[in-house]
Image (cartoon, helix red, strand yellow):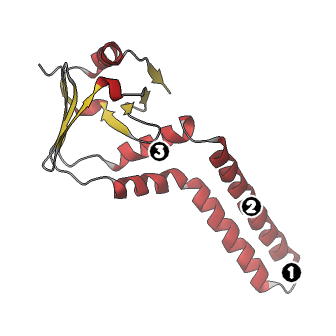
Amino acid sequence: MDYFVLRFDHGYRKEDFRALTRLAAKTTHKWSSRIISAFGLAVGLFSLLSGLLMLWSDEETGELTATLLLFGGLCLVLFLLRSRLNAWGARRQAIRVENLTMKFSDEGLTESSDKATVLAPYSAMERLMHYRGCYFLFVDRLHAYILPEDRFVVGDSADFRTFIEAKTGKTVEYI
């Protein structure tokens, strides 16, 4: 018996991957990646402010000023768009499927599409999270099933939390 069914006509949306990358940035990224992001932001601000200061001082350093302004602007844009860029990369690596269906039964999660059918037992779920209207069932630190609440066609998404906690023995973390 299928307790919950989700249907994706054209696979995952861009917003689904964006939510996953933002969740990963908040919960699973190492402290080293956060330090690198902060360093990139600091370098970008320093370069941009140095370029603006040189521009304001009216000295004959046109090439250096332009380089600092461009480099600082690039660093800031990359810092601000990092989650979108990560989501774009994840979406490019994902398998393109049509008519994706996820069914939750007594045995586990059955994911079927026009390309393959996969059964994931509930014991494979390492971590359960809820973030921005989606449930994320992590099978390891970097890979998760994304379950947007608006894609449930059988079963109520409000009852899903109780169901998945009972089947996996883990608690859903709300971020």
> With respect to residue 127, does 142 lie above or below?
below
Question: Residue flagged by tag 2: what amino acid is it?
Answer: Val
Image quarter where the N terminus lies is top left
Q: Which mark is residue 81?
A: none
Name the one closer to the observer, 31 or 25. Answer: 31
Give the residue at mark 3. 21
Label 2 element class: helix
Q: Position of residue 108 (x, y in %)?
A: 23, 25
Give the residue at mark 2. 43
Question: Residue flagged by tag 3: what amino acid is it?
Answer: Thr
> With respect to residue 119, does 87 lie above or below?
below
Label 3 element class: helix
Label 1 vs label 2, nearer the camera: 2
Residue drawn at x 24%, y 54% is 96
Q: Is residue 29 left or right of residue 165?
A: right
First in sequence: mark 1 vs mark 3: 3
> With respect to residue 113, does 174 lie above or below?
above
Q: Mark 1 Cα within 10 Å, few/some/many (few <14, many 20+)?
A: few
Q: Position of residue 104 (x, y in %)?
A: 21, 25
**CB atoms of marks 1 and 2 within 8 Å:** no
- Label 1, label 2: how many angstroms apart (C-alpha)? 23 Å
- The picture quadrant where one finds residue 137 is top left
Q: Mark 3 Cα within 10 Å, few/some/many (few <14, many 20+)?
A: many
Q: Is residue 23 left or right of residue 65?
A: left
Q: Position of residue 106 (x, y in %)?
A: 19, 18
Question: Residue flagged by tag 1: what amino acid is it?
Answer: Asp
Q: Which mark is residue 58?
A: 1
Name the one closer to the observer, 27 or 175. Answer: 27
Q: Position of residue 92 (x, y in %)?
A: 35, 58
Q: Mark 2 Cα within 10 Å, few/some/many (few <14, many 20+)?
A: some
